[in-house]
Amino acid sequence: MLLLIASLLAAAQPAETPREIQRALETRALALDTSAWLARAALPAPRALHCAVAAGPDKLLIIGGRTGSTGPMTTDCLGYSASEDRWTGLEPMESERGLAAAAFADGRAWVTGGCRRFGTGLAEVEIFDPVANFWSAGPALPESLHDHAAVAWRDSLVCVIGGGNWAPGSPPVNRVRWLDPAASYWFSATPLPVALGAAAAAVLGDTIIVAAGWTDSGPTNRAWRGVIDPLAPEQISWSEIDSIPGAGRCRASAVALNGRFHLAGGLLGDGRCVAETYSWDPALETWLRETDLSTPRADAGALVALGDWLHLCGGYTGTQPYTDTHRRRYAGRYANDCGVEVVTTPRGRLFPGVPVSVRARVRNHGDLPATLVVTALVVDTLTGNRLLARDTSLALEPGERVLFDFGQLEPPAGAVIATRVGTWTPGDENRANDTASALCRTTGFSDPDGFGYRWESTLEPDTVGFAWFDPGGGETLGPWLPDPDNGLVQRRLPFLFPWYDNSLDRLWVGTNGYITTSEVAVGGNLGLPWPDIEHLIAPFWDDLDLRTGGAVLETVRADTIAWTWLGVPRHGEPDRAVTFQALLIANGRLRFNYLDMDADRASSTVGIQGGDGSWYRYLEFALDGLPPERVPRDSVSVLFHRPVTGVVEQHQPAPVQPDQLACPTVWRAGPLPLALAAPARVEVWSATGRRVRVLDLEPGRATWDLRDETGRPVPSGAYFLRLDAPGIPPARRVAIIR
């Protein structure tokens, strides 16, 4: 289609330059979808690990980085003009560097730290004057630093936040420092709540937003805001905000624009990049999903805001070589822009049978009054059953926000519930915020660990019940190495047991109530994560002693293997014993059962750990009697679940071909005219999935009188019309507004 437009433009105006044709194409594309990431002039060469910063309303700078994964860091400085869509080579820096950070203040770009070789930070600061095209030396950082964030506040101070990564000798730090350009002086500020490197940051007024990054446990999806005291900027009040949806990530790109913090892309712990983009709206206190990048991207420096446009240049896409692509997306205001801000409920942890309201917040972001159709669909994704489907019509003034309640549902036990709320209004210029979704599970599950494991137990109002696995006929394990007090025995599994990113075929069973892939005999229990042991399963990790009594039985039946600690006393307490078991089920589930817990239970660890526990891959159910409500006791079961997979959200039917059935997209009064190519039966469906009417129609005089099968007028809302014919996909959509 765009090629056709290009040829027509070229034929009509042969004097136009290729750049003018490109602008015309972009204008046309913008009219079609203003939320898209549109191509701009590519970088002169592929590049990643660079700085990106705005140097005025029309110009951005790309500084340093490198052009290949094995090449050296560069001194390059490139300038881009948005009005000309053109890159220009500028005076290079004095020092090669990548993974630095830049901020623009007092008419100059301040480039701080970085590295020439990964893992070895620099303290050097260089200053670029874009008017004079001249570099000068700045006051050195108090410490060598790379993979940090930098922001400018009130065009007068530069803030350097955190730093460090996974390189040996380069752990994340929580330090925050201000540079006063006028005095060439660094001073310390309130540190971050956590040590954090490779983070994204931007300033909204007097508030710093810091999101994602690399922690001591790996990439994170956490986010914080720091409120600056204008009279004493060294005083920053930090607090945590909602986590970014999805997996933890680092080296994402961010910028503040039009009162929102925008975040794009990022690098996952397994080396993959993501294309997701989000914005944080402080008025809503929530993350909003925006249009994905055209390709996954990380290591692209900061997002840069020029006018109402977000720019992202170069970066790492997950494969080599680096990319030279340059994309921009409109993030300003629209005259006609209605959307769903957030599905407020159902979210988080739900309980079976406890009614919950289905609510979503809808807003007219545009400059004109609008009448819109709002639909809600709630589905049990595991069974395909619709739990709730409603639609309504709303009239909103510019800026008006409505929290709409679609009614209540009772979550069934064990359901994975997908809620999708959408809006539709004719001529909407911005389709990026038309829908919002939420996914939750109706149990008292724990929050997930970094991989997605969750637990439920009989100690909470969950669906799991106590079910003791009879170990009768099982094999008594031994001999224990080095001894029955703190010993191990290796066992082969009858099936491959899926466990985090691995499949286990053998394990070491310990006398002290734990199972692992490491041949490490441990006496007393410790808290999780414990990096000196790999892949830990701890039904009741304690100082137990088989020398004075008891046994450990292994029982295999069908798709389950169970290890039962039967009447095993604690060390030094031969008269007080515990009986418990751990069951590995071939589908990846893990169950702990507790039958007789007579011994002291205030010094045990109960939980699981994947690998060495890094990247938050562990779930600690209880430790040393805390929390007291989760200390194992008689007739208690704990069930650990792998992440739910195969959840598919339901979508509305796709439209049929226009030559089969045509109708207006919005209809306000009188019978609805239908254009048919031949005699046909037409079915009318509501947005809730209910069939409203069946019509046998002839071409030429086909109409729908806007009544249902009982003759009653249908309410305002969205409806779908489809032909009852084989091979014809549903359906044409019409909004009825009364």
Image (spheres, rainbow, N blue to C red):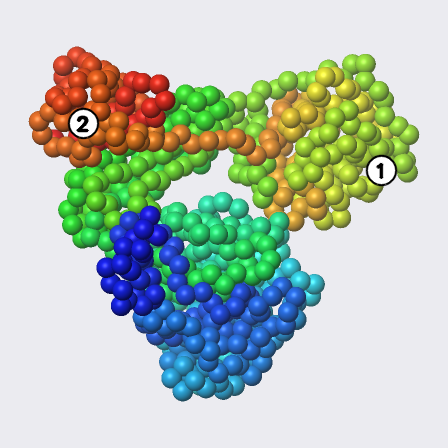
Residue drawn at point x = 43 percent, y = 25 percent:
380
Across and down, in percent, residue 167 comes to 67, 62
In the orientation shown, which residue stands out farthest toward the left? 670
* Residue at (74, 34) in percent of width and height: 504
What x and y, as percent, mark residue 358? 33, 31
Q: Is mark 2 on a helix, strand or loop?
A: strand
371 lies above or below 653: below
**Among the 4 quarters of the image, the one containing residue 394:** top left
Q: Left of 637 or right of it: where is 11?
A: left
Can residue 387 be seen at all in this image of the molecule? yes
> How many labels sit on residues?
2
> In this view of the protein, which residue sits in the foreground, 514 or 4?
4
Q: Mark 2 points at which residue?
A: 675
Nearer-the-camera pick, 327 or 20: 20
What's the residue type where badge 1 is placed? Asn
Instruction: Please determine whether, in this image, residue 171 is positioned above or below residue 488.
Output: below
Label at residue 486: 1
Question: Which marked residue is nearer to the observer: mark 1 or mark 2?
Answer: 2
Is 720 on the left-hand or right-hand side of 555? left
Residue 14 sits in quarter: bottom left
Callout 1: 10 Å neighbours few (<14), some, many (20+)? many
Q: What element carries label 1?
A: loop
Foreground pick, 74 / 119: 74
Q: Position of residue 29 (x, y in %)?
A: 31, 53
